[in-house]
Image (cartoon, grey):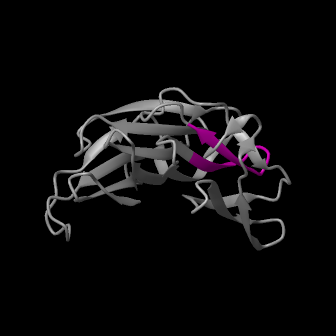
Amino acid sequence: SIAIGTDNLPIISYYDSTNGDLKIVHCTNAACTTHDIATTLDSAGLVGSYTSITVSADNLPIISYYDSTNGDLKAAHCTDSACSSSTITTLDSTGIVGQFTSIAIGTDNLPIISYYDGTNSNLKIVRCDNAACTTHDNGLTVDATGGGSQYSSIAIGADDLPIISYYDGANSNLNVVHLNQTVTGIAFG
């Protein structure tokens, strides 16, 4: 996954399948023909698949990803623009959760993450309470049809509300959910 940092340079999060680690590389020019040495952000077990990156309101990169060893959704918030280190937070650990993550920054300047609940085959979201996502709500189910809500992608629409596209595996459909002002007591916009 790729984002443009506040230094106007690309930053890329990825899964190192050889070592089972979450890694990041910070480009040192706009074309990314030169870059810093790749940094390992999380190496505790098999971690880092399904990564999604954006830049938080504090101007630092934040990455959502899946911890395969524990079946958890995690976030890594970088401590500087090159992401030489990060703070790791487990966001959801109820069952097998966290695959197919996608992260965006809401109009409230807080990260919001869509992801797959593999235990129940549902689409869920987590909304962070701060830019680093060290505090957050509990994972909220958005689509509970149990249809295999995979490969989600989240964005903030022109109406300042989250919109999520995802694959409905039970019906082989592309689904879109537009979240309204509140979802289970959480206000958006």
Report if residue 128 is visible in the image.
yes
Relative side of 2 to 170, left or right: left
Position in image of residue 96 (x %, y %): 68, 40
Residue 58 inside the magenta-drawn segment = no
Relative side of 23 to 182, left or right: left
Magenta segment's dominant SS is strand
Position in image of residue 141 (x %, y %): 75, 44
Q: Residue at x 64, y 32 (%)?
A: 93
As rendered, which of 142 and 68 lies closer to the eye? 142
Q: Quadrant of the N terminus?
A: bottom left
Relative side of 16 to 137, left or right: left
Q: Residue at x 51, y 38 (%)?
A: 74
Read off the magenta span. Answer: 113-127
Residue 114 inside the magenta-drawn segment = yes
Examine the rendered structure and indicate whether residue 30 appears above or below residue 83. below
Position in image of residue 41 (x %, y %): 34, 39
Report if residue 42 is visible in the image.
no
As rendered, which of 6 and 144 lies closer to the eye? 6
